[in-house]
Amino acid sequence: NCHFLYPVHISLAFVTTPTVQSALYWLCLRLLHRDYAAVAQLCSRVGSDQPYEPHEEKVLRHIGTVRDEHPDAHAIRLRMTLTILAMQMPWDVCRELVAYVTKLAHVSGRCRLPRTEELEVLQLCQTQRRQCELVGAELKYLKSKDQAELQSNLEILFDPRAQLEASQQSASASAEWVKRITTVLRANRLQASPAQVKALLLRVLKEEHKLTALEICVLDNRQAFLAGPDPTATYTSVPRPQEDNWLGHMDRNAVLCSVIDLQEAVASGGYPQLAARTLSLQEALGKALETCRDQAPLKPREFVLLYSLFTRSVRLKLYGRVTAKQQHSFTRLLLHLNPAHRHHGILASVLHILSNNPAICQEMPKLSRFHTNNDNQWRAKISAIHQQLQHYERWGQLHWASHPHELGSLPSVLHVGPTLLGLRPVSHPMSCNALCPDLIFATAPTGLPPAPSRSFMGTATLCTLRGQYTIGPMCVDSLGCNATALHEFGTRPLCRLLPRFVLSPTAPAIPIREGLPFDLTHHPAMSHPLATKALQRIVAEMETFAGFYNCGQVP
């Protein structure tokens, strides 16, 4: 007698099967106990890519004697068939699959085969049916040719006593016959080993391979049904929508307007009441839900709350302590939840600037109840906000996110002639006070070979507000300087030689246009007489400067 010892896990939740034979025996006990869910989990433990040992095959044959017609039992046998493909199963796979399909509505979810595994079993059934057809054809051919030879070959194969008493010629003829059947099966791309051929011969002789018309119809219909959901139709790909960059949306209305416009925008309908010093989780979620449903433009009350959250005048308390970065991210999301957040109003512009520039939020003026008790204090606080934004804009400390529809306003590259020799870009780009964030080029380090004559990286670039202009040796005459000055331009610091020939009065200048390049007639700020007079003075000064510059007389 054989005994098995199963180690129990320290949690007492499951046992461990140390060998395949112990796993088979445990599976047999669970199957006899009709615990199909546990048997489905054990199927993966009995898998092997090699034929079973004799003692393991004995347990497998014992499992085959359990004639359980429960729907889950059919599913368990099919699972074991896929796990033990190297063994001859002690049950008819085709009839088990027919029973499984006819009882599919009653199979539990833990035991049901996935679509891929069911297709594998159907393919296995087709293979077995094809093997039996070929073996049956060989038996029929040999029976019609020489029935005595067929009887002798079968006795030698299945009767050990006859195999011992057979002559050498009869044994060789029997082995040659099995070899011929193996060759026929392999010619049809079917698995064929001597043990498999012997099992197929025995099955065909007993006529166990014959299926009824109903069983064949069930298998064929199931094969067609499972092959139907395959992606054979053509799909039309929906074009990808244009990138919107909604999170980086910004406008310059807050820095272009006057302080009076900002004061009027905040004071429309009276100055709002300040929010509480803290915003709890429940209040924050309620505010987010209210913001999503609101379709109207930004109101002063909402502006004060979001501005206070950006500047941390109001502290966010979602879960304990919230850092400044987390509060800024939450406020930014809260701002963009409003469907009308892109209305180009002055209040929305201030919030968009703070949203894309978290570094300046802590330095902006804070709104507190002590300093916003009356209208004069409100006007002073708004003036401080406007002045601070103007200061950051003047010194280039505001980050303006580029919008896909605003690409025309970005600097462009204009190439004028071939490249300049001996120049290489510096390893680290230098800041240019946010006027032009492109590379500043410097001379090549000592000991490096000179750049090739047509190298793109050897280009001298002059950065201006309107774009980039490439200067090469062929444009010396157009600049009004000689080759020596151009060589000094490439080998000496840029700041020393820039006034020498780039801004030289003798160089022909590009004519500039008189007047403003934009129209401010319909801007809200033009309703003030002071703004109108200031703009007229700017236009007059630009016309005077353009006249001097176009005549070659730089003032």
Image (tube, rainbow, N blue to C red):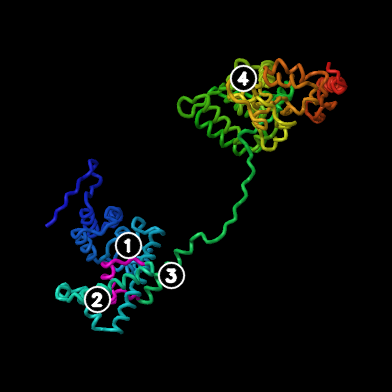
Mark 2 or 3: in front is 2
- Residue 445: x and y in percent read 59, 21
Expressed as whole percent of the image width and height from the top left, the position of residue 498 reads 73, 18
Q: Which mark is residue 364?
A: 4
Compared across the picture, whether 244 is left or right of 418 comes to: left
Of mark 2 and mark 1, the one earlier in the sequence is: 1
On screen, residue 276 versus residue 520, left or right, reads left
| Position in image of residue 489 (x %, y %) | 71, 20
Q: Which residue is disc 2 drawn over?
A: 173
Q: In the rendered image, which quarter is residue 408 located in?
A: top right
Q: Label 2, label 1: how many angstroms apart (C-alpha)?
A: 38 Å
Tag 4 near tag 1, CB within 8 Å: no
With respect to residue 7, does 185 lie above or below?
A: below
Question: Mark on residue 54?
Answer: none
Q: Helix or strand or loop: what does disc 2 sit on?
A: helix
* Residue 3 shows in the view: yes
Magenta residues, start to end: 190-211
Residue that carries the numbered disc 1 in the rendered image: 78
